[in-house]
Image (tube, coloured by chain):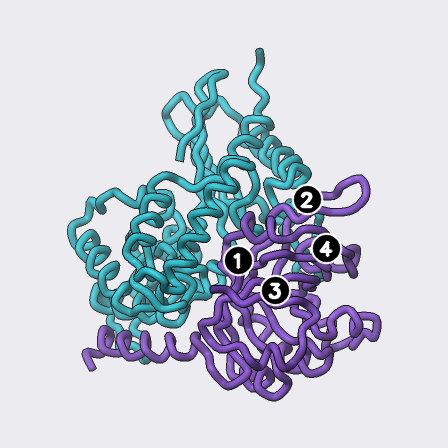
């Protein structure tokens, strides 16, 4: 049974989540990827703070359709999160973000920030762009579109029933670390015979 | 009615972006069947298969990263390269407007997105003139996540103790997959090239993705290594999305080229589960599509 998370969300609700939990998100999430993370660290824009407080960042560069009076998400799956590892921990602390949605997991620096600030890493299915795009019910706004282009802009998505799995929690748990260690032992046997 | 070459390419792009080749889809269905009931891995593959269906029915991109657009064009001397290139570029711009492709071309110095998915080297077109009378085109869309986990080894390699033989190739391929984990959207497919120089080796590794998943390598030694690597890599247990599970890769394809005595490259290209490839044949005015 999936756990419903309404955004913005409290620290308490996020700390209750554990690795392996299936969640469904409702409310506003904000896309941010490579250029956006560099920008958040270097420029520290104040206008972004109320948009991000208590919500979740989505590592996503969507395909967007321009409508007469706004936008629609055509395809919006997650991008590889590991590239934001140098920035993510600081962004979580600085902007009061309660979680990150992406794919592939993140490293020790982010895991430490999740613990310190009370946040989670949520894994969405990589490549499932139509299914996840259909969970975006409306586009509430966009920032830095002209400067960053469509894939890199901050898109504010209102989602309903957006599916994800907790793979890194605020208690130091990381499914990615567990899998990497286990597969590393097998790889070592296959390569070196030990 | 005269053939509209731009429209023919636009349809090729639509098919490549919104549909999976049947051999790949069959492999994903089999992978879903193998995973443990109730596991996160099985859940991820169920979502993958649902996504394939939704994308196909709605002509939307399977994945929002519509990737590097890699064309291989075989054509007779009577068809000018320039005409084909112009049609591909025009079709690409149209495809962005129709949301079949994402604007995916960024100036590497200014950081500016060109907005229409075209630029220096994008789309990527490889021409080859041949003796046949018809034109054959393959299009592969290769996303950035899986491209980033590709790896090239110059063997001997100290870390894996890989030497200049097929045993060395086996070692570095396993090492590359262990380093990739789930980051390339597993379960992926591996295209491997042995030999060549750095550039030709990577190109040959990607050309392995033009082979059917179900084919058999005509080189017996390479066929045996493909089979062994597929089994061993799936023992790693990295699984779909890196969640842990039985299927880490769907296929392993290996090609070889001659090399210099001084060099021995092993190039490993990783294709995500969203393995997008489509083909088009033009005979006179008649256009047919396939995979």
Closer to us: A131 or A11: A11
Q: CA distance from mark 3 to mark 4?
A: 15 Å
Please give the name of the residue rendered at 47% of the width and 64% of the height, measured from the top-left corner.
Answer: A1
Cβ atoms at labels 3 and 2 below 8 Å apart: no
The quadrant where residue B2 appears = top right
Earlier sequence position, callout 1 versus callout 2: 2
Q: Chain of mark 3?
A: A
Which class describes the residues within 10 Å of circle 1: few (<14), some (14-19), or many (20+)? Answer: some
Chain coloured purple: which letter? A
Please name which of the two marks, 3 or 2, marks the residue nearer to the observer.
3
Q: x, y (%) of residue A169? A: 52, 79
* Residue that badge 4 annotates: A149
Q: Are marks 1 and 2 on the same chain?
A: yes
Q: CA distance from mark 1 to mark 2?
A: 17 Å
Name the side, left or right, on which B223 lies relative to B192.
left
- What label sits on residue B144 in the rendered view? 1
- What label sits on residue B116 in the rendered view? 2
Kind of element beneath mark 3: loop
* Residue that badge 3 annotates: A59
Closer to us: A140 or A110: A140
Chain coloured cyan: which letter? B
- What label sits on residue A2 in the rendered view? none
Q: CA distance from mark 4 to mark 1?
A: 17 Å
Q: CA distance from mark 3 to mark 1?
A: 14 Å
Please name which of the two marks, 3 or 4, marks the residue nearer to the observer.
3
């Amino acid at each position: 049974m999936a756990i419903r998370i309404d955004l913005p969300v409290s620290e308490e609700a996020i700390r209750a989540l554990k690795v392996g939990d299936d969640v469904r998100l409702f409310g506003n999430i904000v896309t941010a990827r490579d250029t956006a993370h560099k920008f958040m660290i270097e420029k520290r824009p104040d206008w972004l703070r109320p948009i991000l407080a208590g919500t979740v960042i989505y590592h996503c560069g969507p395909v967007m359709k321009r409508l007469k009076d706004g936008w629609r998400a055509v395809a919006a799956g997650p991008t590889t999160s590991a590239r934001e590892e140098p920035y993510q921990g600081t962004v979580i602390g600085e902007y009061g973000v309660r979680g990150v949605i992406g794919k592939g997991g993140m490293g020790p620096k982010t895991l430490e920030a999740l613990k310190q600030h009370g946040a989670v890493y949520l894994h969405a299915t990589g490549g499932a762009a139509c299914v996840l795009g259909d969970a975006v019910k409306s586009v509430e706004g966009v920032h830095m579109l002209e400067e960053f282009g469509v894939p890199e802009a901050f898109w504010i998505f209102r989602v309903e029933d957006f599916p994800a799995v907790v793979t890194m929690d605020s208690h130091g748990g990381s499914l990615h670390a567990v899998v990497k260690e286990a597969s590393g032992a097998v790889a070592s046997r296959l390569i070196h015979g030990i | 009615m005269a053939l509209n070459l731009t429209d023919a390419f636009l349809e090729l792009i639509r098919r490549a972006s919104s549909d999976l080749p049947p051999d790949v889809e069959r492999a994903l269905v089999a992978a879903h069947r193998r995973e443990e009931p109730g596991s996160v891995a099985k859940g991820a593959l169920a979502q993958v298969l649902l996504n394939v269906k939704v994308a196909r029915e709605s002509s939307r991109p399977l994945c929002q990263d519509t990737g590097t657009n890699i064309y291989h064009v075989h054509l007779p001397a009577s068809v000018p390269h320039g005409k084909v290139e112009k049609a591909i570029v025009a079709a690409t711009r149209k495809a962005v407007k129709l949301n079949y492709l994402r604007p995916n071309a960024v100036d590497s110095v200014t950081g500016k997105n060109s907005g229409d998915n075209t630029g220096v080297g994008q789309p990527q077109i490889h021409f080859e003139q041949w003796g046949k009378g018809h034109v054959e085109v393959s299009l592969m869309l290769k996303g950035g996540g899986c491209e980033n986990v590709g790896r090239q080894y110059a063997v001997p390699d100290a870390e894996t103790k890989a030497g200049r033989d097929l045993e060395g190739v086996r070692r570095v391929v396993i090492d590359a997959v262990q380093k990739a984990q789930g980051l390339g959207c597993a379960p992926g497919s591996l295209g491997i090239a042995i030999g060549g120089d750095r550039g030709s080796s990577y190109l040959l590794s990607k050309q392995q993705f033009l082979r059917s998943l179900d084919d058999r390598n005509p080189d017996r030694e390479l066929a045996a290594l493909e089979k062994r690597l597929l089994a061993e890599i799936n023992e790693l247990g990295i699984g779909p999305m890196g969640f842990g599970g039985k299927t880490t890769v769907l296929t392993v394809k290996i090609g070889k080229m001659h090399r210099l005595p001084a060099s021995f490259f092993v190039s490993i290209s990783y294709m995500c589960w969203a393995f997008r490839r489509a083909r088009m044949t033009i005979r006179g005015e008649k256009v047919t599509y396939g995979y």
